[in-house]
Amino acid sequence: CESLQSITLPRNLASIGDSAFRYCESLQSITIPDGVTSIGDSAFSYCNSLQSITIPDGVTSIGTSAFSNCKSLQSIAIPESLTSIGSSAFKGCRSLKSITIPANLASYANIFSDIYSSIESIYFKSTGPFLKMAEIIKNNRTRFIALKVIYVPRGSENTYKSHPAWTSYADLFQGYDY
């Protein structure tokens, strides 16, 4: 699939299998239908021309290395329905500047693996202090060299700013409507 630039998947598709589009280096855009519930391991790895992707509500799992080494990927919005994300899902996505994290994401092993230095903004959908994510960011503070803003739901800014886990980031929080 070296010359494949775009694709619209069928509406009745339930899952995107392991390595389904791996090494589709010219793939720039893909429309994932609403019926998809899982994206397999390495499904889009090495899709070097892919700049952004919208993962529809209904997707509950993203496999290990699913988007690894998508060198042009700049933003990704993870839907509220997602409950599990495999390790190194975005490893090597060095152009990734923005990521949206849903409120109920239970498993996110190494979600920032190897992309710390490019992330400029993080969008949290949780109104609570999201303590697991605070620990990840705190433990890697020197790696998040480009981080300029952490967006949280409007009205919850003070909840984050005043929580001991987030005090060193208080100046980065801004409210937003999603």
Image (spheres, grey):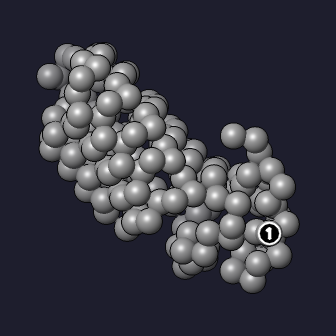
Q: Which residue lies under the disc numbered 1?
A: 159
Instruction: Point out the image quarter for the N terminus.
Output: top left
- Vertically, is 60 above or below 105? above
Q: Secondary structure at mark 1?
A: helix
Residue 22 is left or right of residue 128, and the answer is left
Q: Residue at x 44, y 65 (%)?
A: 106
Question: Residue 26: in sight, yes or no?
Answer: no
Q: Residue at x 35, y 57 (%)?
A: 85
Q: Residue 4 lies in what quarter of the image?
A: top left
Residue 176 placed where, x, y %? 77, 45
Residue toward you, 113 or 14 = 14
Q: Residue at x 51, y 47 (%)?
A: 80
Residue 90 placed where, x, y %? 37, 51
Question: Residue 139: in sight, yes or no?
Answer: yes
Residue 116 placed where, x, y %? 51, 60
Residue toward you, 66 or 60 = 60
Residue 29 is left or right of residue 159, and the answer is left
- Vertically, is 138 above or below 174? below
- Vertically, is 168 above or below 44? below
